[in-house]
Every structure is written in structure tokens, then in C-alpha cells.
Image (cartoon, rainbow, N blue to C red):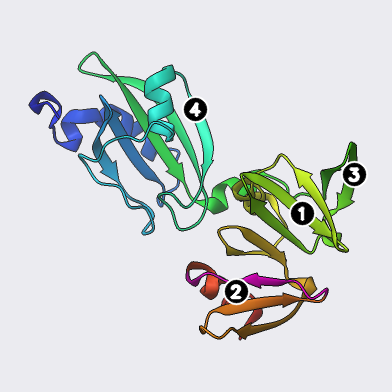
Amino acid sequence: MNNEYNLSPKDISQQFITILKDWIPSNSSIAIAVQNTYIYFHSGHQSIHLEVGQPVQPDSIAGKVLHSKKRTDAILDNSLFDIPYYGIGYPIHIQDVPAALVVVLPSTFSVQKLDPYQFLTGKQDEDWNPVAIEKISHIESLQKKTWFYVEGEQFKTSITLKELQMRLPSFFIRIHRSYIVNIHFIKKMSRDLTSNFIVTLKDGSELPVSQSYINTLRNALEF
């Protein structure tokens, strides 16, 4: 990174930070990137792992802003975060050089802005089927596609797992990078031969619980 951009937070963008503090929640995070390198980062989330000097990933919000020079927003998943967050990126200039200002809002912010799904429309063969959300037993991400299950039948949806996690009712719980489960369909929780947790559904389906989500499941079901 060029020395001309190795500036203190005040020198970098005091004008931007002052404005942002007037409207974003105090537990939001702020990042600024110039020439594909982060030059400023303030963390409002303990789960964010980002450092000054770290290169910008092309598929990140900052990367997309630097490439398109347009406002970009997205729901962020576990690549940098333990749970999904809502991020917004803005094109700015630092010393006449194109830069990206990214604000990462806590998950509760976006959840409050969006109503929970009441149904999902899934594709099966050549038909599209609207299904009431409470009838869905679990949702799976497999081979870059999202599937949900109703009474043993499989339906495909274009909505990603990370987007669903933000919009599903509270009785749906993320238990794995690839699975979200409806707790009303859980029959039991147990350990397998390697002491990893397994969720068994009422239809006999067995879903793995990853270590990063076990506390979420414990807190929800109080065991």
C-alpha cells in the first residue's frame, strides 16, 4: 500500500465518519478501501475479522463498489462473519482516488426492516408450488442450489440460505452451513459415534449440527 494512503482515521475520512455516526447504530462496523486494500476499519461486531492492510476480495461489497463505482448492498454470510449481516457500500474518493466506504449493520437491523416470509414458492419438475412456511421441515443448500422439504417432497427455490436466515420466522434455526431446520419438526437431538450432534426429524431425516451453531440450537431449545 502506498504511504500516501497510510493515514490516520481522522485524515482519511472524518467527514464520512461524522455523518455516519449520526444515523447508523452504534454497533455497526465501518470499513474504507482504496486500491484494493483496506485502509480503515472500525468494528462494531466482535465476530468480524478484518484488518487494515488486508486485501479486498473481488466478490466482497468493497470489491464490487471499487469495480462498478456504484452503491452496492448485500446480505453477508460466514466468509467474514459468524452470522449474516447487512452491508452497504458507497463509492467515494480519497485524495482523488476511487475508494469504497462500507457500512455493516447488525442482523437485527435488517430483520426489523423486513417482514418474515409467510410462504415459499418452490419448483418441482415444471411446476411452481407456493407452500406455507410452517409446513416446511428443513431447508438445505446443496451444489449451489437451495432446496426445502415438505412431507418428504423436495422443492427448489432461488432464495439463498443466507437470505432465508434473515427472513424466516423465529422457529427456524440455522444448524449448519448447509441446513436450516424448523424446530417443530425436530424429534430429538443426539450425538453420533464421533460425539458430533445430530438432529433427527420426525420423518427420520438426520441433519448434522456444526460446532459454530451448536450454541444457537442449545439456546433455542434450552438443553
Q: From what the image shows, is residue 148 above or below residue 189?
A: above
Instruction: State the quadrant of the N terminus.
Output: top left
Q: Earlier in the sequence, mark 4 or mark 3?
A: 4
Per the image, label 1 sits on a secondary structure element best described as strand
Residue type at tag 1 = Phe
Residue type at tag 4 = Thr
The numbered disc on residue 129 is: 3
Residue at point 79% right, 72% down? Answer: 185
Residue at point 70% right, 65% down? Answer: 181
- The verdict on residue 33 being magenta is no
Residue at point 37% right, 22% down? Answer: 66
Q: Are marks 4 and 2 in contact (CB under 8 Å)?
A: no
Q: Which residue is mark 1?
A: 148
The image quarter containing residue 68 is top left
Q: Earlier in the sequence, mark 4 or mark 2?
A: 4
Residue bounds of the magenta highlight: 203-211
Q: From what the image shows, is residue 107 above or below residue 220?
A: above
Q: Which residue is mark 4?
A: 72
